[in-house]
């Protein structure tokens, strides 16, 4: 469960979040969409504690955020651009993060198998392709079986096969009752993975509801059209 | 009694019939030996007026009870050996000493220990005397109320050899001493000078150690003094010098080691001094030479890691530096003949700056100062243009 | 908390050792110290030359190294920040992890030649002083580099430019300014002033400590009472060490505060 109240954040004179109110219940899978610079990444970073809000409050499960860190035990995050220390090997990175989190990595082997990371484990991270780095990111996000999962443009660098594998995996997580939050520019992909959409524009939530409702309201067949028409209206 | 030519022995001991040293001396004839056994003798102003040997066995103690001089020698050919002298009188008017040798010649004072004395061994108008292997220690920290360890006044041909002097005003003091031979002494922790040479021509001092003296060693108003193989070390303070030369002429300073002194060699109004093959190491200033000094010749010395090499008070230079090794030299030797191809300028700009603004001392060794110094060495503006070593050695001189 | 800190630091150690250039940095000091001793007569002057190099280059290398680390590891640091760990622990883990190898590279690189040339025994106190100062300077300037990296997080050109300017200022210009002030106000009593001003620059502090070790005999030639008390007793060493400790703590502490408040 994530609850956000009147969240505001500016960088210098630039207001990025202008009073966001959101309630994302447990087990919901949600897509965050919006044009570039709308505030999607800032919103996620604020929930993750990377960015400190100017005002407003965020509650994750039972914890109200105030610079604390324990709540992140329940969060897995896959970044958009995954860059790691160059001369580190993949398995070392996994070991390092395991040591850091000190939680059982119950899905480690399963994810490695599913995403075909096995042959990459002994390689140094700098030699990895962008897609394989993304897979490492996905593994790190999911291997500790956290309740809440954030994916930031997850399939951007993945080949179609891996992308398919990844989506299957997310589907499984969804079925296991995980709260899932995805930002993506690929609407077709979102359509497969989420059942709720948050549309952010200029630091405000313009739409928050189920994809079904959105499609119904906007008389569109596909999410892509629905969002596009919303952008035009704005 | 009839005087015989046979040397007799007179015994003085607390348990013998003669219990006073003066009584023993009085009973002895010229040429006799007065043997004094261990014990403490409370006596002062003991006088010897005939040639004899005064010999202490197991170091008897003569305690002067803080009154006057303890022993006075007033005849030739007297030997005093093996005693401990304690507690002379102290006075602002009279120079009380443990042993005073007054107008005598051919004496030997050796292997005595002197503690808590005003003056130690005092030679006045003597000739050919020997002061050897004595130990003098006194710890009155005030310069005015302490006297000199070995004091020579109007003396000819003295030999001062192997003595240790500590905590006096001057360790060894010479005034109008001719042909003094001062060899192998250790003079340390004295309130003023370890060795103080005044108006004393033609002497030699070799193999001595002068350590931690308030003002180091001063050699003044003399000529033909030969100073060799001495060690001058740890003489620290604003007016402390390894060796201070003032109004010296025609002398020779060779093979000495100057180590960790505030100023190793200070020279004022001194001329024709040859300073050769000395080790001048880790001093604040290796040489401070006043412009009143002229025709002094520094050669084959090792100047090693001194904070400053040479300091002077004038842009003119009347002395010659040639063929020394300077560890601060940064030149090169392309023809590989062991001599640097560019001259070394031992007066740094920084030492001129310090002369003007002493507080800038705190900037020593800073990068900025090093840049200034390097620039000045290439294009001298403020440092003496003619003070340089044209043949700086590339390696230490052995 | 401490085991986590160590876990993070260990990861950096492994990675830096593999990067080899910290090893190269240590080798440079090894070669430098060895040749200084080999060609410089093998006496204490080698330690002095070493300290001259150290006073000039450790601050520059330390700062560049610190800021470069921040710039190269941005995404990794951000990834770590999304993990359930305290920012404070992460900061110290990274700082300890990257500063200690650089420090050890200097210490070991210089220590070995000092050892096989016998200086460690002959001049134990002076060696310990020079090595210790190099170590402390490394820590101070890596943390300054860290701080600048965090402050100019999004503008590398500015960050590097600022670092170079700070280095030029502290290593060279600062002393020029002090000298200028000394000459401008020459007729006032300045001893306290110049001591105080020198205490504000960590490079000057380290230099003064080197001076206290190697130039006491010259310092004793100064007649001023304040200098004499400062240089002639243990007071100089004690005050300088205290100030250096403060310098050790301050940039790191400010860096931590910036790190804790920063939006990544």
Image (cartoon, rainbow, N blue to C red):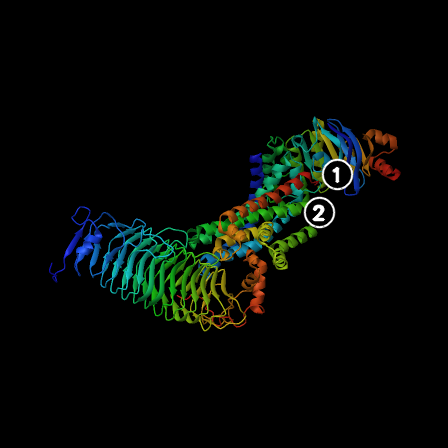
Per the model, the C-alpha gap separating discs 1 and 2 is 16 Å
Residue B366 lies, in percent from the top left, at 56, 57
**The quadrant where residue C73 appears:** top right
Residue shown at the point (78%, 35%) measured from the top left: A8
In depth, the one of B123 and C214 nearer the eye is B123
Q: Is residue B82 left or right of residue B175?
A: left
> Height in image: B390 above or below C137?
below
- Residue matched to label 1: A42
Q: Is residue C135 left or right of residue B213?
A: right
The numbered dot on residue C89 is: none
> Dot 2: what SS?
loop
> Which chain does tag 2 point to?
C
Q: Quadrant of the C terminus of chain B?
A: bottom left
> Dot 1: what SS?
helix
Residue shown at the point (61%, 37%) measured from the top left: C89
Q: In this view, does A148 lie to the left or right of C202?
A: right
Count residues near mark 2 (Cα–Cα under 10 Å), then give few for <14, some for 14-19, many for 20+. Answer: few
> Height in image: A147 above or below B48?
above
- Residue matched to label 2: C154
> Which chain does tag 1 point to?
A
Q: Quadrant of the N terminus of chain B?
A: bottom left
> Height in image: B182 above or below A21?
below
Circle 1/circle 2 CB separation < 8 Å: no
Residue C32 in view here: no
Residue B194 lies, in percent from the top left, at 38, 59
Residue B64 lies, in percent from the top left, at 29, 50
Residue A193 lies, in percent from the top left, at 75, 33
Tell me the mark number nearer the camera, choosing from 1 and 2.
2
């Amino acid at each position: 469960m994530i609850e956000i109240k009147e969240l505001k954040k500016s960088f210098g004179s630039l207001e990025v979040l202008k009073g966001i109110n959101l309630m994302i219940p447990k087990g919901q899978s949600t897509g965050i969409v919006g044009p570039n610079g709308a505030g999607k990444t800032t919103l996620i970073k604020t929930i993750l504690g990377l960015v400190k809000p100017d005002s407003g409050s965020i509650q994750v499960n039972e914890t109200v955020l105030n610079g604390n860190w324990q709540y992140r035990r329940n969060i897995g995050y896959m970044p958009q651009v995954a860059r790691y220390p160059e001369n580190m090997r993949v398995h070392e990175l996994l070991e390092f993060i395991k040591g850091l989190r000190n939680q059982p990595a119950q899905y480690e082997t399963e994810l490695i198998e599913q995403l075909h990371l096995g042959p990459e484990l002994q390689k140094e991270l700098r030699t990895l392709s962008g897609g394989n780095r993304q897979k490492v990111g996905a593994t790190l996000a999911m291997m500790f079986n956290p309740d809440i999962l954030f994916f930031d443009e997850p399939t951007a660098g993945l080949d179609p096969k891996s992308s398919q594998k990844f989506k299957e995996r997310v589907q499984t997580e969804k079925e296991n009752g995980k709260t899932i939050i995805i930002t993506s520019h690929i609407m077709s992909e979102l359509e497969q993975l989420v059942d709720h959409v948050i549309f952010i524009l200029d630091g405000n939530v313009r739409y928050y509801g189920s994809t079904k409702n959105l499609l119904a309201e906007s008389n569109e067949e596909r999410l892509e059209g629905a969002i596009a028409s919303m952008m035009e209206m704005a | 009694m009839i005087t015989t030519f046979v040397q007799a022995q007179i015994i003085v001991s607390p348990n013998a019939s003669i219990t006073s040293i003066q009584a023993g001396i009085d009973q002895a004839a010229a040429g006799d030996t007065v043997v004094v056994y261990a014990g403490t003798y409370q006596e002062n102003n003991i006088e010897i007026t005939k040639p004899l040997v005064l010999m202490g066995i197991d170091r008897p103690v003569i305690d002067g009870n803080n009154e006057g001089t303890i022993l006075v020698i007033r005849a030739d050919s007297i030997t005093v050996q093996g005693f401990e002298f304690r507690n002379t009188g102290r006075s602002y008017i009279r120079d009380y000493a443990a042993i005073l040798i007054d107008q005598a010649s051919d004496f030997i004072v050796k292997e005595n220990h002197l503690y808590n004395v005003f003056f130690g061994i005092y030679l006045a108008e003597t000739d050919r005397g020997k002061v050897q292997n004595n130990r003098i220690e006194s710890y009155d920290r005030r310069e005015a109320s302490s006297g000199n360890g070995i004091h020579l006044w109007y003396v000819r041909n003295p030999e001062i050899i192997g003595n240790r002097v500590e905590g006096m005003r001057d360790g060894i003091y010479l005034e109008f001493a001719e042909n003094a031979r001062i060899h192998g002494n250790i003079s340390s922790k004295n309130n003023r000078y370890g060795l103080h040479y005044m108006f004393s021509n033609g002497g030699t001092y070799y193999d001595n150690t002068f350590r931690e003296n308030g003002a180091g060693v001063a050699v003044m108003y003399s000529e033909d003094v030969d100073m060799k193989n001495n060690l001058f070390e740890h003489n620290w303070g604003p007016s402390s010098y390894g060796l201070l030369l003032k109004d010296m002429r025609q002398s020779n300073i060779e093979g000495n080691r100057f180590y960790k002194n505030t100023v190793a060699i200070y020279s004022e109004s001194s001329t024709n001094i040859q300073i050769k093959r000395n080790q001048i190491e880790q001093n604040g200033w290796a040489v401070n030479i006043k412009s009143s000094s002229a025709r002094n010749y520094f050669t084959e010395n090792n100047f090693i890691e001194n904070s400053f090499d040479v300091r002077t008070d004038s842009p003119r230079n009347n002395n010659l530096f040639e063929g020394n090794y300077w560890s601060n030299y940064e030149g090169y030797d392309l023809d590989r003949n062991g001599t640097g191809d560019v001259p070394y300028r031992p007066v740094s700009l920084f030492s001129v700056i310090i002369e003007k603004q002493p507080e800038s001392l705190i900037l020593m060794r800073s990068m900025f100062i090093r840049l200034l110094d390097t620039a000045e060495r290439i294009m001298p503006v403020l440092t003496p243009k003619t003070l340089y070593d044209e043949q700086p050695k590339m390696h230490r001189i052995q | 908390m401490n085991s986590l800190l160590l876990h993070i630091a260990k990861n950096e150690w492994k990675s830096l050792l593999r990067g080899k250039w910290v090893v190269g940095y240590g080798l440079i000091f090894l070669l430098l110290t060895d040749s200084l001793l080999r060609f410089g007569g093998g006496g204490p002057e080698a330690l002095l030359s070493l300290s001259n190099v150290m006073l000039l280059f450790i601050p520059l290398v330390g700062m560049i190294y610190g800021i470069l680390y921040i710039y190269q590891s941005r995404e990794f640091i951000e990834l770590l920040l999304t993990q359930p760990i305290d920012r404070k622990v992460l900061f110290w883990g990274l700082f300890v992890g990257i500063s200690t190898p650089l420090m050890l590279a200097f210490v070991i690189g210089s220590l070995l030649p000092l050892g096989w040339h016998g200086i460690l025994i002959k001049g134990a106190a002076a060696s310990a002083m020079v090595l210790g100062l190099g170590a402390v300077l490394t820590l101070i300037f890596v943390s300054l580099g860290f701080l600048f990296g965090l402050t100019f997080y999004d503008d590398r050109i500015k960050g590097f430019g600022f670092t170079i300017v700070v280095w030029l200022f502290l290593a060279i210009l600062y002393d020029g300014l002090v000298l200028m002030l000394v000459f401008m106000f020459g007729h006032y009593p300045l001893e306290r002033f110049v001591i105080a001003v020198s205490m504000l620059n960590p490079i000057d502090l380290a230099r003064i400590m080197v001076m206290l070790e190697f130039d006491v005999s010259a310092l004793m030639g100064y007649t001023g009472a304040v200098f004499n008390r400062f240089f002639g007793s243990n007071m100089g060493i004690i005050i300088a060490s205290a100030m250096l400790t403060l310098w050790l703590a301050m940039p790191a502490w400010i860096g931590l505060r910036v790190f804790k408040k920063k939006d990544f």
